[in-house]
Image (cartoon, rainbow, N blue to C red):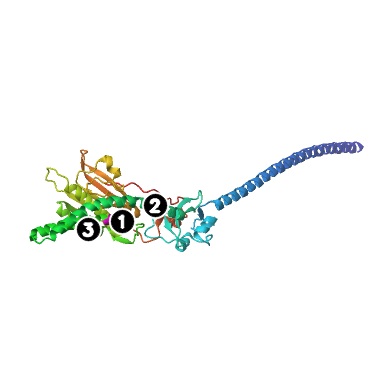
Amino acid sequence: MVAYAENKNAGFESDLHETLALFQNLSEKLTTSYHELEGKVTELQGELEETDTALSQEVSDKKKLETRVDSILSAMPVGVVILDGAGEVTEANDAARDILGDPLEGQSWISIIHRCFSPTMADGHEISLKNGRFVSLATQSIANEPGQIIVINDLTETRALQKKVNHNLKLSEMGKMTASLAHQIRTPLSTALLYADHLSGKVLDEERQQRYAGKLKDRLLQLESQVNDMLIFSKGGIIIENKVDVNWFLQELVRRYSDLAHQQGVVLAAQPFASSVSLKCNVDLLTSAYGNLIENALHALSNQSDNTTRVKKVSLAAKLDRHGRIIIAVLDNGGGIDEAILNNVWEPFFTTKSTGTGLGLAVVNLITKSHGAEHKIKNRIDENGRIVGLSVAIAFPVAVDVIPENVLNIHKNANMSVGVSEKSAPAIAVG
């Protein structure tokens, strides 16, 4: 019994020693794990502090950048307006407020258009505002998000300065014009006086009276044409106030100049234009411009002598190009113009005629530019490389009765990834 008790105590002590050893081992492992965890916590705290410092620095840098951008926007001489995807203004700088007036933020761009813009028929790439200013617009889409950045450039002072420069140039050119016209008017005026003197005689039969009267009328018409060119060339501003159908305009030119063409043995015809398109124009001045082109073509053909039986012809043609412009051209089947002087024909006082003032095509150039149009003159070449006539074409923007598209499109495209940007006028392609 005693032996059994001793054995039992010995077993208990052995278990106790094992338990204590296991506990001690677990305690050591727990202590080691705690120290490792403590080290990890310290490490994570360090990383967190570094991340927090970096984040704070990033926030600080962004605030500095935002402040810098705001300062740049405020200092910019052009207006900057930022639209969101719905076409509403989220931000605008001081220059934009000065140009367009308040309020801007929170307003839709389309409402600002109707409040501030006042487009006129004379506007080209510039746009008139109701406050009397003239501006140009350029846009850029915002990267990776819907919206638009609109840059508004105030061209009021530039336009006024350009107007003053043009006025001074005009005065200089008018001085040259006066001297030229004094010389050019003298000859037809002297001839007209001579015919008038003949008509005052009482010994003329009816046939001679009619002949002298016709010659007197021709000289007076020549004088009238020269004076009209002078008035157009010296006029300060041209008002674009009409809208005319292209086909009507072509037929009106034929009606006005068919008798003159017939007298010179030339066929004048207009090719029908299939589309119903209108032109913004000053119809009187545009008629005068094309009248100069037609008269030049008739003069070139009537003075051309050849041994062929071909029909001398001047054609008027119109077409729409791929850029949406309407091109109206005067085409003849004459001998063309020397390539060496082709680019000089638009200059004031340049002429190859012995009786010309050199103002005809200069007037055409002036009227073309005042309509926001572009002209091109070139010889017509056949498949054998021979000159078979001359082509003078003018490309016009098609008439619209609404606010300019480059203004409205900014609102329409505010939620698109690509903005509307102003492009230079494409070249005229004329056959």
- Of the numbered discs 2 and 1, the one sitting upstream in the chain is 2
Check disc 2 and report its element: helix, strand or loop: helix
Residue drawn at point x = 43 percent, y = 54 percent = 159
What residue is shown with label 2? 168
**Percent x, y of residue 184:** 24, 51
**Residue nearest the viewer, comparing 134 with 397:** 134
Magenta stretch contains residue 230: yes
**Percent x, y of residue 264:** 15, 52
The magenta region covers: 227-233
| Residue 343, image quadrant | top left
Q: In the rendered structure, which amino acid carries the disc numbered 3?
A: Gln
Check disc 3 and report its element: helix, strand or loop: helix
Q: In the rendered structure, which amino acid carries the disc numbered 2?
A: Asn
What residue is shown with label 1? 232
Q: Is residue 27 left or right of residue 121?
A: right
Q: Is residue 364 left or right of residue 68?
A: left
Distance between mark 2 and mark 3 Cα atoms: 38 Å
Magenta stretch contains residue 161: no
Give the label, 3 or 1, closer to the camera: 1
Check disc 1 and report its element: helix, strand or loop: helix
